[in-house]
Amino acid sequence: MKKNNYKPGQKAPISGQYEILGLKGGKTGIERTIVKNEPFPPTLQAGQKYVLADRTKTGGK
């Protein structure tokens, strides 16, 4: 299953930890916490994207 990539400025579909992908799509190990419907912040280099690394887990019922 292909993971969705997100560009800076797009709104996050769900809250979670998003990893910045390198220019060729490789992992950078750099993650940002993004809240649902908030825009993704600028990346370190132009052309990088985000991918969901860990969805936020809530204890609510």
Image (tube, rainbow, N blue to C red):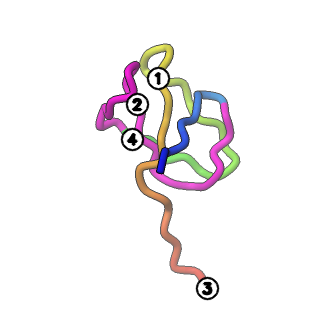
Q: Residue at x 61, y 85 (%)?
A: 61
Upstream in the sequence, badge 3 or badge 2?
2
Q: Which residue is mark 4?
A: 31
Q: CA distance from mark 1 to mark 3?
A: 36 Å
Q: Residue at x 65, y 29 (%)?
A: 9
Q: Which mark is residue 26?
A: none
Q: CA distance from mark 4 to mark 1?
A: 13 Å
Give neighbour class at mark 3: few <14, some 14-19, many 20+ (Cα, 10 Å).
few
Q: Which mark is residue 61?
A: 3
Upstream in the sequence, badge 2 or badge 1?
2
Q: Secondary structure at mark 4?
A: strand
**Residue 14 horizontal side relative to residue 2, left or right:** right
Q: Secondary structure at mark 1?
A: loop
Q: Which mark is residue 48?
A: 1
Q: Residue at x 54, y 24 (%)?
A: 42
Q: Pinpoint residue 20: horizontal percent, then vertical percent.
A: 42, 33
Q: Secondary structure at mark 3?
A: loop
Give neighbour class at mark 2: few <14, some 14-19, many 20+ (Cα, 10 Å).
many
**Residue 39 horizontal side relative to residue 43, left or right:** right
Which amino acid, by three-letter code, is at mark 3? Lys
Upstream in the sequence, badge 1 or badge 3?
1
Tell me where the magenta segment starts and ends, as one range. Answer: 10-30
Q: CA distance from mark 4 to mark 2?
A: 9 Å
Circles 3, 2 touching at the beta carbon (< 8 Å) = no
Give neighbour class at mark 4: few <14, some 14-19, many 20+ (Cα, 10 Å).
some
Q: Residue at x 29, y 37 (%)?
A: 29
Depth check, mark 3 against mark 2: the one in front is: 2
Name the one closer to the observer, 42 or 6.
6
Q: CA distance from mark 4 to mark 3?
A: 27 Å
Q: Pinpoint residue 33: horizontal percent, then vertical percent.
A: 48, 47
Q: Which mark is residue 21?
A: 2
Upstream in the sequence, badge 4 or badge 1?
4
